[in-house]
Amino acid sequence: MTSDVLMHGVFRTFDKDNDGFVSVKEWIEGLSVFLRGTMDEQIQYCFQVYDLNGDGYISAEEMLYLLKDCLSQQPAEEDPDEGIRDLVEITLSNMDHDHDGRISLADFKKSVMAENLLLNAFGVCLPDTTNTRVFEQHVFRERQ
């Protein structure tokens, strides 16, 4: 995870009391979901990371911003704005199940349950299983 936008979202999601700090309790609870959360917990977590303004929805503007950020990490020969706008339209048409022009948690959950790869649709904000295993082995080895 190298995106400042996603890292800010992860911090916001860990910081449950919105005091600008992650307490030990928030850190442990956040890592629990981050590393070993149930599918429902991880859906909620990813949704909160992607909901940049915290209004309970992922808007087309938020999707555009997140996807631009993801693609800015990749070298490009041309300006991808038009392609990203098309991708946002396609995403909205497929994930906006209640057709209100934005993605609610219910829309996101329904989409992810149908296709697990959509969990990281707007940027990778969860570790893969290999990295999770390596991290856990390192932490538990240090304690022995």
Image: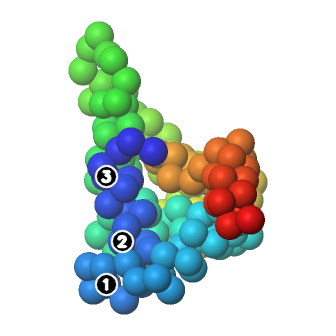
Residue 12, disc:
2
Looking at this rendering, what residue extends furthest in the front direction?
A: 144
First in sequence: mark 3 vs mark 1:
3
Residue at 44% x, 36% y is 87
First in sequence: mark 2 vs mark 3:
3
Residue at 29% x, 10% y is 77
Towards the viewer: 98 or 105: 105
Towards the viewer: 55 or 29: 29
* Residue at numbered disc 1: 18
* Circles 1 and 2 in contact, beta carbons < 8 Å: yes
Q: Is residue 82 above or below residue 3?
A: above
Q: Is residue 50 above or below residue 28?
A: above
Residue 5, disc:
3
Q: Is residue 133 visible to the viewer in this orientation of the structure?
A: yes
Q: CA distance from mark 2 to mark 3?
A: 11 Å
**Quadrant housing the C terminus:** bottom right
Q: Amino acid at mark 1?
A: Asn
Q: Amino acid at mark 2?
A: Arg
Q: Is residue 128 visible to the viewer in this orientation of the structure?
A: no
First in sequence: mark 1 vs mark 2:
2
Q: Amino acid at mark 3?
A: Val
Percent position (x, y) of residue 23?
40, 83
Q: CA distance from mark 1 to mark 2?
A: 7 Å
Residue at 31% x, 84% y is 18
Q: Could you tell whether 61 is left or right of 143 in the image?
A: left
Badge 2 marks a residue whose secondary structure is: helix
Category of crowding for the residue at label 3, using alpha-carbon neighbours closer than 10 angstroms: few (below 14), some (14–19), many (at least 20): some
Q: Could you tell whether 84 is left or right of 121 in the image?
A: left
Looking at this rendering, what residue extends furthest in the top direction?
A: 77
Towards the viewer: 93 or 54: 54
